[in-house]
Image (spheres, rainbow, N blue to C red):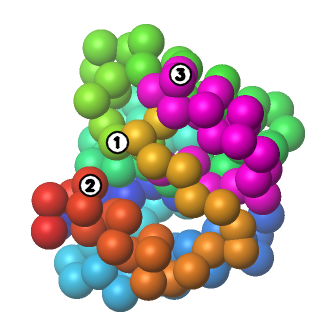
Amino acid sequence: MPNILVVEDSPTMRQLVSFALKRIQGSNVTEAIDGVDALKKLSSERFDLILADINMPVMDGLKLVSLVRNDPNYKDIPIIIITTEGAEEDKKRALSIGANAYLPKPIQTQELIRLVNQFLGK
């Protein structure tokens, strides 16, 4: 059963992404409101995939990506960045610090599910 962590400060967006992911059979979705909350959840549970927004209070998605990549316990978890930041430099930066994929908002549910299944090896 894939365990997916959705890190997003907007309750509406978090709900939308979680709802889309529930279409993936057997998936378990955990939500975090920012990078700090995500790290707390990572320390107590094993995740197969992380989806994170860039712009969040307390700790943004890029900081989260770099912390996850520098931790031997989590460094192999695939990370998909979901953001309104559509600029090419933001995408390059996210990928250069270790994100595996970059999905611009507004998200297309089919594209999200395709990407998630790709990283879960389905």
Secondary structure beneath dot 2 equals: helix
Which residue is the extreme one toward the right? 57
Q: Which residues are magenta?
A: 80-98
Amino acid type of the residue that numbered disc 1 sits on in the rendered structure? Pro
Query: What residue would you read off at disc 2?
Result: 119
Dots 2, 1 in contact, CB < 8 A = yes
Q: Vertically, is 88 above or below 30?
A: above
Q: Residue at x 26, y 68 (%)?
A: 117
Q: Quadrant of residue 11?
A: bottom right
Q: Which numbered disc covers residue 104?
A: none
Question: Is residue 39 something one can see in this rendering?
Answer: no
Q: Position of residue 106 (x, y in %)?
A: 71, 74
Label 1, label 3: how many angstroms apart (C-alpha)? 12 Å
Quadrant of the drawing holding the N terminus: bottom left
- Bin the neighbour count of mark 2 within 10 Å (Cα to Cα): few under 14, some 14-19, many 20 and up: some
Q: Residue at x 39, y 15 (%)?
A: 71
Q: Position of residue 26 (x, y in %)?
A: 21, 78
In depth, the one of 52 and 37 nearer the eye is: 52
Label 2, label 1: how many angstroms apart (C-alpha)? 7 Å
Q: Quadrant of residue 3?
A: bottom left
